[in-house]
Amino acid sequence: MIDFGNPGTWVTVFLCIFLGILFWKKVPGMITDALDKRSADIQSELDEARKLREEAQHILADYQRKAREAEQEADTIVAQAKKEAESFAKETRAKLEETLERRSKAADLKIAQAEAKAVDEVRSAAIEAAIKASETLLTGQTTGSKGDELINKSIAELKQRMN
């Protein structure tokens, strides 16, 4: 029989009443629904995290591809710049050599002109000295009108030959 004086009996009775109320109010269903909702929320968060991870991987792959392309473009630009620099240096060397050659030719021409001028001046001075010497010699050796005529004629001939 049931001993109502025992506290364990009352605990069992109240436990049964409590469990009965819980089932009557559908508390286990609410707990299951709450757990199902929590599970669905966790699953959607996991799905969203997976999508974000995939997007991040795509973005990383894009970034790496763009970095490779930029590096290749930079290498191409550097190679092109080297080619242009070499071409410019070659062209500059050629122009410098051409300029030096022109200046050398101009200097040679100026030297040749100066030599020709000096030779002409020396010739002129020698001619004038020879004329004066001849004039002095002839003046001393020949006298009179015949001597003057001979001197003038010789001077005129000498001038014509020199020009």
Image (cartoon, rainbow, N blue to C red):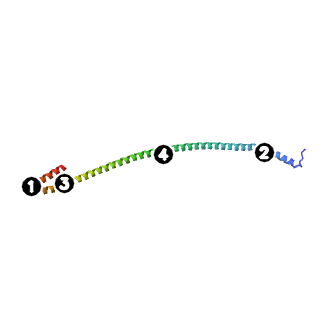
Q: Is residue 78 visible?
A: yes
Mark 1 or 4, nearer chain start? 4
The residue identified by callout 4 is 78
Q: Amino acid at mark 3?
A: Ala
Q: Residues within 10 Å of mark 2 (few under 14, many from 20)?
A: few
Q: Residues within 10 Å of mark 4 (few under 14, many from 20)?
A: few
Measured in 3D between alpha carbons, the distance from the residue under mark 2 to the one under mark 3, in whole angstroms, is 154 Å
Looking at the rendered structure, the secondary structure element under dot 4 is helix
Give me the residue at 27% from left, 51% from top. Answer: 115
The residue identified by callout 3 is 130
Q: Position of residue 2 (x, y in %)?
A: 89, 45
Q: Which mark is residue 22?
A: 2
Q: Which mark is residue 158?
A: none
> Left or right: where does residue 95 sit relative to residue 112?
right
In which quadrant of the rendered image does the N terminus lie?
A: top right
Mark 2 or 3, nearer chain start? 2
Give me the residue at 17% from left, 56% from top. Answer: 133
